[in-house]
Amino acid sequence: MSLTSVMQRRTLMSATLATAAVLASLGTHSAWAQNAPKIVVTDLAYAQQVSEYFEAGTFQRSAQMSANASASGSHSHGHYGGSGGYSGSQAMQASEQASGTYVSGRYSYIEQRELGAYTNDIKGALLRGTAFRLVQGKGFDAGAPQASKAEQVLNQVKGGKMATPKRQPQVGDIIARIKKGEFSGADYVLFGVVSSIDFSDSLSPLQGTTSATLQYGLNLLADFSLINTRTYEIKAAFSAEGSGNDTKILSNRGDIAPPNRAKVMRETSQSLAHSVYEQLTDQLGYSDSNLSRGVREQQMPMPAHMRDQGRPPSYAPAPQPEQVIILR
């Protein structure tokens, strides 16, 4: 057998093995994608202190008064005698009724809700960059409405008993929410909590001119955790930041130009989603080799406003473990 024939047979065998490996890999990936984990992306949870003024009580008052008086008299004098007379009457009535219970003041409480305006772009990033299946979870159930502070105080004054406070569900108690069935059917929950949200509005004069720049911005910081709904194991945990701004040039420093709030919120949502995707896929490459198989190889494109600002990705995707297929 000539050397050329041997080389041709080896080349053909290598090509056959490579083709078989690719087909096997595609078959394996297709089978994995059909059974890919289901993930719920929650709305961003937040808690804030709220102060309110309240008034409680009923108060009734009535008053009544009447008075009557009359008088008459006569008198005459003769040369040898005289006569006279006098008569009068007087009456007076008075009554008053009063009732009470009136209380006013201020009180503070913690309001727990979900912020649903910044998670759709996160879901879109996961749909584009991973093979995970996304399912819709239930919104946070804050429980039955509590009686207002005015109603509580009024009931206490009338009944003489302090109202027993009812424990309300906690938006940050993700384990209780999983057990409650808010994420039924999901294998994992990507849970986010707002750490800081800050709006900024600054005016900067342009030197040598009467013009100025007006910049309106929004910075949002949130903490995320990817949690297994069966074992409560944390597969990823990180903080992600999103920001957006709108800049306008004012011809005169006293001019008024309303900011484009929709643009600012859109940029914030997109940059937050980009940060979440980068960090989530990066950590899955180290924490769970099975989940990391759901991350596609191409890198998620950076939002346009971040490219314009020349901002580099905050995290580079972790290298995915190579799959070794042995053909026998």
Image (tube, rainbow, N blue to C red):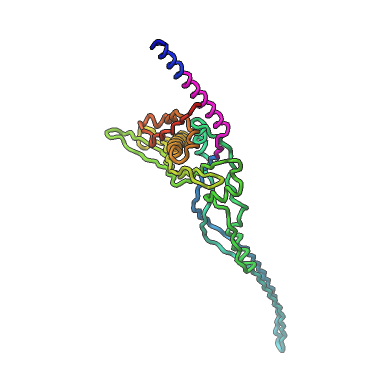
Q: Quadrant of residue 188?
A: top right
Q: Nearer the viewer, residue 109 or 118?
A: 118
Residue at the farthest front position: 1
Q: Main secondary structure of the magenta part?
A: helix
Residue 323: give x, y in percent of width and height: 46, 31
Residue 118: give x, y in percent of width and height: 50, 39
Q: Nearer the viewer, residue 228 or 76?
A: 228
Above or below — where is 278 with respect to 9?
below
Residue 268 in view of the camera = no
Numbered-mark total: 0
What residue is rendered at 61% in x and 43% in y?
184
Above or below — where is 96 with respect to 79?
above
Above or below — where is 303 with respect to 217?
above
What residue is rendered at 44% in x and 37% in y?
285
Tell me which segment is drawn in magenta. 15-39
Residue 289: give x, y in percent of width and height: 47, 37
